[in-house]
Image: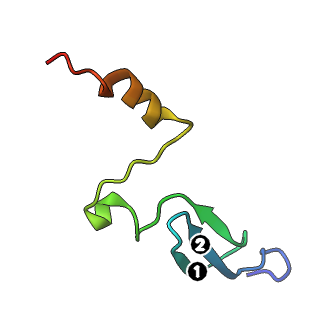
Amino acid sequence: MKTGIHPEYKPAQVICSCGAILETRTTVGDIRVEICSVCHPFYTGKQRLVDTAGRVERFKRKYGSSSSS
């Protein structure tokens, strides 16, 4: 490898919205994520709704309150 042309590869933290902190190495620094392997439904087996710009509330208002059955 040539010297002086590669970016610095330094330790960094991946910080999830659930509070989990994972240690890794990267060239960009600290990373913030919404879902990680600690809270992802595939790994935990639990359902978690991620609200993106009020979509869950909009869905509940539109389809959730229908009691005409």
Apparent side of residue 23 relative to residue 63 in the rendered image (left or right) = right
Query: Which residue is nearer to you in this view: 40 or 63?
Result: 63
Quarter of the image where the C terminus is located: top left
Counting from the top left corner in percent of width and height, residue 63 is at 32, 23
**29 relative to 3, above or below:** above
Density class for disc 1 (Cα within 10 Å; few <14, some 14-19, many ≥20) is few
Counting from the top left corner in percent of width and height, residue 6 is at 78, 75
> Secondary structure under badge 2?
strand
Look at 66% across and 79% down and name the residue there: 12
- Residues at badges 1 and 2 in contact (C-beta under 8 Å)? yes
Look at 30% across and 66% down and name the residue there: 44
Task: Specify the label residue 24 is tagged with.
Answer: 1
**59 relative to 15, above or below:** above
Query: Which residue is nearer to you in this view: 13 or 46?
Result: 46
Considering only order in the chain, which callout, 2 or 1, is on the residue closer to the N terminus?
Answer: 2
Residue 7: quadrant of the picture = bottom right
Residue 15: quadrant of the picture = bottom right
Residue furthest out toward the top: 68
What's under tag 2, amino acid-wise? Val
Q: How is the image coloured?
A: rainbow
CA–CA distance in space, label 1 to label 2: 7 Å
> Secondary structure under badge 1?
strand
